[in-house]
Amino acid sequence: MTSDPRIRPVGEITTEHLFDIVVDLAPPLDMGTGPFGKRILFGAAGGSFEGPGLRGEVLAGGGDWALIRPDGTMTLDVRLTLRTHDDALVHMTYGGRWIIPPEPRADLSEVVKRNRIDPAGYYFRTNPLFETGATQYAWLNDVVCVGSGYLVDGGIAYKVARVR
């Protein structure tokens, strides 16, 4: 078998820390099981984000229209509005996957236990994109990010990195 001569080295993908974000969640709204799985709305009730050059608050009103597939994998469909410390608005969207092995799944239903689950024990990754009309943050319109999620008291958190 010969390799395709059109394939060229393009360099390794690298990342740099953009910010950490905590999203406070409203009580979930269970929409029931439909043709694609169980749909649940995890509404955003607030939160905060902070990184080397970006900080502010998560505004209430967004959320995650999550789909739990029959195999237990959660497919994310998130839309959030961020307000920076200098009053700029940023639209943040991301999809992703949260795959939890069967062993820790039972602990998710228990409030005391769920935040103690080690994030290394599951796969929780996202792909944030941004949109803003704020001149000082226009660079966000052209970046792709990756995020790694984990549970916190009252919500969810992510470490978000910009892909270089």
Image: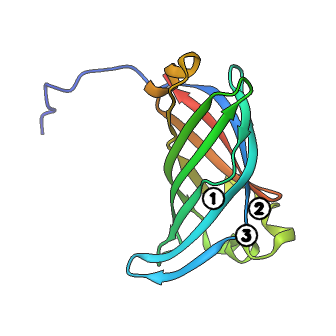
Within-10-Å neighbours for mark 2: few <14, some 14–19, many 20+: some
Residue for badge 2: 117
- Horizontal and vertical percent for residue 151? 74, 56
Say above or below: 159 vs 87.
below
Q: Are marks 1 and 3 in contact (CB under 8 Å)?
A: no
Q: Amino acid at mark 2?
A: Ile
Judging depth in this view, the residue of 18 and 148 nearest the camera is 18
Secondary structure of residue under mark 1: loop
Name the residue tied to disc 3: 27
Label 2–label 1 contact, CB within 8 A:
yes
Q: Residue at 30% x, 20% y: name it.
A: 9
In percent of width and height, residue 149 lies at 65, 49
Above or below 93: residue 19: above
**Measured Cα–Cα span from mark 1 to mark 3:** 23 Å
- Asked whether the viewer can see residue 30, the reply is yes
Tell me the quarter of the image containing the N terminus: top left
